[in-house]
Amino acid sequence: MIPRFPSPTAWVLGLLVLACLPACRQEGPSRAARPEAGSEASAASGPNRGAEPGRPRIVALGDSLTAGLGLPKTEAYPALLQQRLDDVGSRFEVVNAGVSGDTSAGGLSRLDWSLDGDVRILIVALGGNDGLRGLPPDEMKRNLAGIIRRARERQVAVLLAGMETPTNMGPEYQRRFHDVFPALARDHKVAFLPFLLEGVAGRPDLNQSDGIHPTAEGARLVAAHVWRVLEPMLTAASR
């Protein structure tokens, strides 16, 4: 079932703000955008959190929603996942591989960089910008399938986070876009979170003034949603 947002207008206006972000990234993916554990580009980074050789990793591959646009690095949802892992005594290190304005094609193109190190779990949270640009859902599906296949070839478990697109592209496009994510989860048998922004999208109290990027409170809810799917994966990924 396609979620209904409390404020479709705010959702659409927020996505229009996002349209400006890729314009600043015309050069495409580069090594400068490559996230590194223990660096400023990693939301898991913070005081006393340097890279530790041999430490198993969880990589969050996404766009500005993952990067935590408008929030301190420590309040983006990957950093909040790190806090939960630390609280339960897990050795996993979360690497934030979110790049604002990124599409599924961009995520696929920088996948090898993102899977550096001892990566055990890959969180795939892409597609919002594909929908914003009206890119064909079949193209997005091929890109996401490529990410999943290449991760699985490396013995990396995948958690796929679904995304929705607003109604301004028409109901048929919205339906086709929505259907991509459960179909991928079913076909590739990966862990699945149906909607990354469940309970957050369209709520002014949980989003910044752009209407699309979560506030710190909204990011906490996103982290809680992801954690419910991620936590059962940890034991197997610890091998």
Image (cartoon, helix red, strand yellow):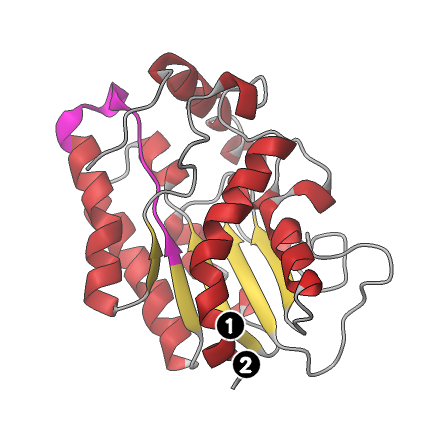
Q: Amino acid at mark 1?
A: Leu
- Magenta residues (range): 160-172
In three-dimensional space, the C-alpha distance between marks 2 and 1, rounded to whole angstroms, equals 6 Å
Q: Disc 2 marks which amino acid?
A: Ser
Quadrant for residue 129, please give it. Answer: top left
**Which of the 4 image quarters holds residue 130?**
top left
Which residue is located at x 45 percent, y 68 percent? Answer: 232
Question: Is 92 placed left or right of 51 in the picture?
Answer: left
Dot 1 falls on a residue whose secondary structure is: helix
Q: Which mark is residue 234?
A: 1
Picture coordinates of residue 15 (x, y %)? 43, 25
Residue 2 appears in the picture as rendered = yes
The reply to whether callout 2 and callout 1 are in contact (CB within 8 Å) is: yes
Residue 96's x, y, as percent? 61, 55
For this orientation, the residue located farthest to the right is: 48
Q: Is residue 131 magenta?
A: no
Counting every numbered tag in the picture gives 2
In terms of depth relative to the viewer, which is nearer, 11 or 17? 11
Q: Residue at x 70, y 57 (%)?
A: 44
**Residue at coordinates 18% horizontally, 32% vertically from top-left?**
173
Q: Return the residue nearer the eye: 12 or 158.
A: 158
Residue 31 percent location from the top left of the image: 64, 59
- Residue farthest top in this picture: 9
Asked where in the image residue 2 lies, by quadrant, the reply is top left
| Observer-nearest of 223 and 45 | 223
* Helix, strand or loop for disc 2: helix
Return the mark for residue 238: 2
Q: Tell me, for residue 21, which label it has, or none.
A: none
